[in-house]
Amino acid sequence: MVTNHKELSDDAFLHQLEEGTIDPALFNHEAHIRMAWLYLTRTELEPALASIIKIIRQLDNQYANGKKYHHTITMCFSLIIALQTRQNKFENWQAFIHEHPSLANPKALLAEFYHEATLYSDQAKKRFVPPDKNTAADFLNLVGTVPYLVKYKI
């Protein structure tokens, strides 16, 4: 029995996510980052984002009755990871996480870009809300390059 997502190969990990067969106990914060990094390094930004959103929503519906998914947090983290993968190439997701320890503390990282009231609003949970702090210049530049956000009004 697998007790940690790290025991799975990257392909097996993604396959279980896509099929909805992964044990939800394995899909912790680190596994979210791993999934995002794998998609963002294997395909273009727009289809990677679509896959990330689909899988997280699917697992949320399957295991949490659709109550936990937060669209702005999903998009923000995915876009931060996308920005970091564009800046540097890493051999694997473990090396990526090691070089970006700020990803391990989601509340602190998100606080760099969002005021708490904005991030935890009902609107931000349902659709993408851009960062509302001045420190978000790189992030906002990346967001501006994503037609997906405009196309789907996310």
Image (spheres, helix red, strand yellow):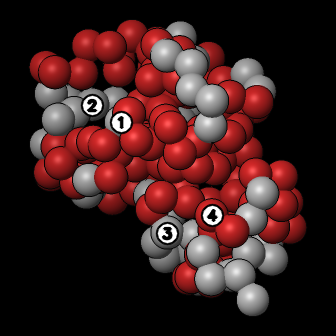
Q: Is residue 124 above or below residue 24?
A: above
Residue at 26 percent of width and 13 percent of height? 137
Give the side of residue 118 with respect to residue 69, left or right.
Answer: left
**Residue contact between numbered discs 2 and 3, judged by CB atoms under 8 Å:** no
- Rounded to the nearest angstrom, the CA distance separating label 4 from label 2 is 32 Å
| Image quadrant in which the N terminus is located | bottom right
Q: In this view, does 112 lie above or below 18?
A: above
- Rounded to the nearest angstrom, the CA distance separating label 4 from label 1 is 18 Å
Q: In this view, does 134 lie above or below 109?
A: above
Which numbered disc, 3 or 4, marks the residue closer to the eye? 4
Residue 152 horizontal/vertical position (percent): 64, 32
Using the rendered image of the protein, determine whether residue 112 is visible from the camera's viewpoint. yes
Q: How crowded is mark 4: few (under 14 residues within 10 Å), some or many (20 or more)?
A: some
Name the residue beneath numbered marker 3.
Answer: 28
Q: Earlier in the sequence, mark 2 or mark 3?
A: 3
Q: Earlier in the sequence, mark 2 or mark 1?
A: 1
Name the residue beneath numbered marker 4.
Answer: 6
Q: Residues within 10 Å of mark 3 (few under 14, many from 20)?
A: few
Residue at 81 percent of width and 67 percent of height? 16
Name the residue beneath numbered marker 1.
Answer: 100
> Dot 4: what SS?
helix
Q: Which amino acid does label 4 sit on?
A: Lys
**Residue contact between numbered discs 1 and 3, judged by CB atoms under 8 Å:** no
**Residue contact between numbered discs 3 and 4, judged by CB atoms under 8 Å:** no
Name the residue beneath numbered marker 2.
Answer: 131
- The residue sitting at the bottom extreme is 1
Q: Work out whether residue 133 or residue 23 is closer to the camera in this orientation and state it.
A: 23
> Dot 2: what SS?
loop
Q: How crowded is mark 1: few (under 14 residues within 10 Å), some or many (20 or more)?
A: few
Give the side of residue 46 with respect to residue 21, left or right.
Answer: left
> Dot 1: what SS?
loop
- Rounded to the nearest angstrom, the CA distance separating label 2 from label 3 is 24 Å
